[in-house]
Amino acid sequence: MRQIAIVGSGPAGYYTAEAASKKWGNNVRVDVFDALPVPYGLIRTGVAPDHQSIKKVALRYEKTALSDNVRFVGNVRIGRDVTVAELRDLYDAVILATGAPDDRKLDLEGDQLTNVFGSAAFVGWYNGHPKFADLDPDFSGKHAVVIGMGNVALDVARILAKTASEMEGSDIVAHALEALKASTLETITILGRRGPHQIMMTPKELGELLELERAAPLVEKDDLPLADKDAELEPGVRKSVDLLRRFAELPPTRRSRATIGIDFKFFFGPRAFLGEDGKLKGLEIERMKVENGRAVGTGELKRLPADIAITCIGYRASPLGNVPFNERAGRFESTEGRIFPGLYCVGWAKRGPTGTIGTNRPDGYNVIELVSEDIGSGRSKRGRTGFDHLAEQRGLDIVTFKDWQKIEDAEIAAARTGAPREKFVDVASMIAAKR
Ligand code: NAP
């Protein structure tokens, strides 16, 4: 019997559990831990609430979670309730699938001003992550600035732009829906330090900006490279650039009909957040040029009005105890996922915040091959029984998958009309719902 602990119940965690279950069938026991009482990590608290079709992948994880050899162990924070060293004593293999929950920081003057947020916090707020439920962003100004030109920036800009009726059928949490209903924003500037050819936004998601009820995208024609240069681009990027060209050609009436403009501002990097009385009022930005693919400052500074700013410039994994950590890259130090025999990492915790949800599937299957090489048929560690004993000694209030199903039923029952669920946004309410 092999005893495996997976820390984190997001896509990387559940694909890894699926791989272990497929490989060893009844000869493995997999415990999937999560610090929250609810599973699915990024699917619940990262994927945009209006992208319900993406969230359907959770049904696949549910199938794994319900198999006899896999169990969910929620409401247990590894590193606080139980250490990694203790888990390693108990299980043949410990696999960290903890994602990249922290914001990469810009570290600019003024980043402590009110209404400056990182995307981990802001996305967590509208998705009901308990850690960010009290964020309280203020949308009473006119100008929002979203920094970065990846899919997270696009999610954030779209959520800021959508009307309440466009959010029907989504699972945006009530506190966010209410705050956004009162929004008076007129412009959402998406700031990119490089140009259209370096855009990280994918075409399907970018195309959604053309469908918005009250908002229209704007690209300055002068920012676009000559069209014959597009041929050099990789097909996905070329499609995104095609869309940027369409945005630049939208008739002025489309733009004047819109009450919110989504302005792509290429070739500008943020230099400082500017405030008055502790509150954000603008950004100092510097014109950039691209040299050998890199953004280089030109020294030309401008001021951009901003009442709220959200940095969407990537994420970092959270260090865990003494586990070797690559500070510069913001992920665990490993060789292809093996930190050392017995301890592994997978998903964003291993490779950093890149790729799609599906990228985590081969990642999970690969890490199980490493585990297999290292532990063979297992070393008769105590695994589950040992953990349950420890949990009882410490009085941990574990949430099982059955408990989660009760929490989920309560969330479904509380859903507003047309929405799939109304999420609990604090741990105490989640725990109360399981009882
Ligand atoms: P990302 O795709 O890496 O984009 C980060 C953006 O931040 C880039 O435009 C980058 O510019 C910019 N940036 C980084 N450091 C900066 C700095 N110091 N100053 C100014 N700009 C800076 O990351 P992401 O948007 O956080 O997305 C993470 C992953 O999740 C990606 O793989 C993404 O595709 C995926 N995702 C997918 C979906 C979806 O499929 N619907 C939704 C959300 C996220 P440079 O390029 O110049 O570095």
Image: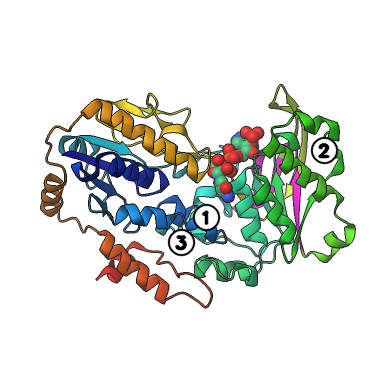
Q: Is residue 51 visible?
A: yes
Q: Amino acid at mark 1?
A: Ile
Please give the name of the residue rendered at 49% of the width and 45% of the height, measured from the top-left corner. Answer: 357
Dot 1: element = helix
Q: Residue furthest top?
A: 292
Residue pointed to by mark 3: 128
Whole-percent x, y for residue 273 in the image: 64, 44
| Dominant secondary structure (helix, strand or loop) of the stretch shown in magenta | strand
Q: Quadrant of ligand 1?
A: top right
Q: Image height check: is 243 above or below 291?
A: below
Q: Amino acid at mark 2?
A: Leu
Please give the name of the residue rendered at 83% of the width and 45% of the height, measured from the top-left corner. Answer: 220
Which is more foreground, mark 2 or mark 3? 2
Which is more foreground, mark 3 or mark 1? 1
Residue pointed to by mark 2: 224
Whole-percent x, y for residue 299 in the image: 76, 29
Q: Is mark 1 within 8 Å of ligand 1?
A: yes
- Relative depth, front residue between 123 and 21: 21
The dot on residue 54 is 1
- Relative depth, front residue between 85 and 198: 198
